[in-house]
Amino acid sequence: MIEPHPLCTLYTQESSMKFRLSPITAAVALLSMPVSTLAQTAPPATPASAPAAKAEVPTQTVEITGIRASLQQAINVKRLADANIDVVTAEDIGKMPDKNVADSLSRIAGISVITSAAAGSGGFDERDRVGLRGTNPSLTQTLVDGHAIANGDWFVLDQTGAGVGRSVSYTLLPSELVSRVEVHKSAEASQIEGGTAGSINIITRTPLEFRKNLTFEASLGMVYSDLAGESDPQASALLNFRNNERTFGLMVQAFSEKRSLRRDGVETLGFFNRLDSSNAPNLVAAHPELAGVYLPDLIGSALFEQTRERKGGLVKAQFRPTKDIDLVLTGFSSKLGAENYNRNYLMAVRPGLINSATLSNYEITTGKNGDRTLTGGTFNWANASTAGYYDMISRDASAESSFFNLEGTFKLSNALTLSSNIGTTKGKGKTLSQDVVELAIRTDRAGFAINGPHSAPAFSFNNPSMTADWIFGTQNVVVHDKEDWAQLDAEYKLDTGMLRSLKFGARSATHKRHTDPTVNQGPGCASGTPYRVTGFDWSQPSACAVNGVDAPQNSPFAAASLPALSASYPSNFGSGLGSGFPTQIGYIPADALAAYNASFANRDPIARRSPFDGGEYSVKESTTAVYVQANLEGDAWGGNVGVRLVRTKQTSGSFRPSRDGETPDVSSLFGNFNATSDSRTYTDVLPSASVRLDITKDVVGRMSVSRTMTRADYTALSAYTSLNTNGMFLDNAAVGGGTAGNPGLKPVRSTNIDANISWYFAPRAYASVGAFHMDLASYITNGSFTATYPVLLGNTGGGGDVQLVDRQFVITGLTNKKATVSGMEFAFETPIGNNFGVGANYTLSNGSDEDGKLLRGNVKNAVNLTGYYENDVFSARVNYNHMDDIFLGLDRGTEYFQKGVGVLSASLGYKFNANFGITLDMQNLNNPTLVNYASDVQPRAIYKNGRQYYLTARVKF
């Protein structure tokens, strides 16, 4: 029989002692338990008659190895917590259950993970963002070791796009660094504010946790991506030293991971054009039934290829000169090289292009919302005309994140403990260059057919030819993200009645996010100067001159200037997506395209600067928070009650077009612009209360009520303004229109109720059911609002002086609305015999705003199934995760959904001895198809990313 571990004894004494470890302390302390104890000891009981003996928490060591031990660890921490918490723990040093932290989190009830930051970027093979309870990932706060981490995005549309700013990209966080991940589904006053739906805390190791004085762990492997057909190296290493006295330790971790990615897709880029007599008079006159019909703007065969190289490391020094003082100094850096090449061979169903054609074999389909859409047709032109475009875009992209942090714990007496945390974190997303050329596709006949919202559309050209059409692309997109913070907390143990301890503290932070000046490139001359160029028309035989003499060799669109399409789409492009779309397509190699742009693109940083098109903005937030929290304990119950007071000072800046008579801050070919800013200060009072009730020795119930908040996304707060004053004069009261950022957005404030009951019916086993409700008083969504702006106006007849006056405008943009999210969670986990085990969870979430519209990020149904086998040398795990359709936001003027999809993954492990083993991790085994759509008759994209296989050898001493 196995003797109970001292910690098990400690936990059985909690009712009489009126002393209980916090969830975080319990998690750390449980790491000291031997594997055999974790795997075989039943969950601790809590009889009221337990003796009131004190016990010392054992010195921390890391000995958690294997699937069963990590699952027992997670269950123990969950059971001991007052609030609703879930935990995923590493199976060994450097070995999380999955290669990606987000994949591991997807196994927890209430978690939804998506493969892209926002609408518009499509979907990739790696989980990137994490949301809680069917909400937008921006409403879930991600921390590392209890503090903020600055973010960087590699994809250009995510770097300055709306809806991205508050979420964190998990592609920068390698799983090898993680000891455990805590998911807090209910708030406490002592937690940093910012997670309306909840928070995720990624915990790294500390040097004095390790059992041995010197520990070395390394992994070396390869990843094979079957669609890309490439194998790439992956390596990581850890070296930890601690002295015999456990007063000093130093841990160094490093990683270098390369991966090739290929995504095949067929995209439909928007349905925002509607036919009418003004934009297509000939076509509508010939077919009156086409009036008011939506058109698919662009339909294309899209090939995306990328090489991702993630490099970095973590260094941590720990000083414990006495048992009452503990200092930890941490530095972390992660950089992701993400060069990518996107090619899209597109048919353009645009009014201006198809108006001169005759239309036959067409079909109009009416959707459930009543909108009519042209879902098929053949266009014939008398002469070869532009019927499409071919975009080739190669990007020098990267992302990075780092932090430097000093935390300390000082036990001033048996009753009073102070803890401090001071640090800084920086993130950066960069697209330094976009090498681009757009070719016009000309033909006398083209046709398309939309095959429903969940299938690839078909399209074709008759004997197409291509000529150079344009050079575009924003350059020097650099988004900086930084936060500095200082925090002081105290806990005073009282052991007075039901008041176990009192926690109180303060935190101050400054967060800044801003962009560098951007450059919006266009065509230029290799040498000499442009001439015979009007607006966007560079179609003259020679558009460049040297000393007044034609120089066609210097023109970007001369036939001799354009590089050859010497490479081709892969022979299996589009396999599994459908049929009827072009697949045998040539393209310019990336290096040749870069050389072409270096010679023929105009990237003048002054003349080509466009603050609007480049998405330039800045946001600064200074926050101060104080809190007090009482931790309570009684016979067979515990909990906490507290309040957090937060003051936020917010300043946001952007650009607007200059008004007549103003001296511009920026003047370029795109116009004159002036900087604009807005400042505001607001205070939030965030009360919270949680209670845990030990109903029986095996059944635990929890309930919590809290007030939470998440500040608006950074891009949403930008003071960008574009006003339309048509019809407005000094002598009338006309109201103007326009679009603008909304620096007056309130944070998303919510009142949350959470209830859960769990039955721990056997070792490594539990079943739970829970319900949750979020009453979001100020959810942020698309809408309109009225605002006052200063504008220069004259009189109707033109007489008198122009005057600067304040006038009202109805602005289209983001605004606050009421919303609710309600749902239930079910979870089950149990071993089968000594070596097998299964787990399952299901989440139901219904979210809508006051108008009945879906909330961004809402997933109604999500299910996760897991099975495993493990003995002393061999382990195997299989996992299946399925999410319902998810609303990702707006893109190109239309709603953007991702169809429900399931993902199958598996892992195998073999341990040759205590020091050496191999693992095979397999992701996306079912080769999932990602489908995006706008409505029941309007498809947006269909993608395949293929499967990934990670073979890794691990050594540990």
Image: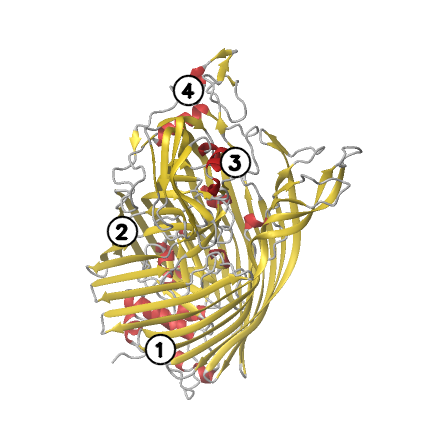
Does residue 957 show up? no
| First of labels 2, 1 by sequence position | 1
How many residues crowd mark 2 within 10 Å: few (<14), some (14–19), many (20+)?
A: many
- Please tell me whether residue 330 is drawn above or below residue 43 in the rendered image: above
| First of labels 4, 1 by sequence position | 4
Q: Identify residue for label 2.
A: 950
Quadrant where the image shows the C terminus:
bottom left
Q: Identify residue for label 4.
A: 558
How many residues crowd mark 3 within 10 Å: few (<14), some (14–19), many (20+)?
A: some
Foreground of the two, 414 or 370: 370
**Which label sits in the foreground, 1 or 3?**
3
Determine the CA span between mark 3 and mark 2: 53 Å
Which image quarter: residue 707?
bottom right
Q: Identify residue for label 3.
A: 279
Determine the CA span between mark 4 and mark 3: 31 Å
How many residues crowd mark 4 within 10 Å: few (<14), some (14–19), many (20+)?
A: some
Horizontal and vertical percent position of residue 289: 47, 43
| First of labels 4, 3 by sequence position | 3
| First of labels 4, 2 by sequence position | 4
Point out which mark residue 760 bears.
1
- Please tell me whether residue 400 is drawn above or below residue 527 in the rendered image: below
**Residue name at image x 21 percent, y 59 percent:** 910
Q: Secondary structure at mark 3?
A: loop
Q: Label 1 sits on what residue type? A: Tyr
Residue 381 shown left or right of residue 775 in the figure? left
Q: Label 3 sits on what residue type? A: Asn
Q: Secondary structure at mark 4?
A: loop
Quadrant where the image shows the N terminus:
bottom left
Whether label 2 touches label 1, CB < 8 Å: no
Q: How is the image coloured?
A: secondary structure
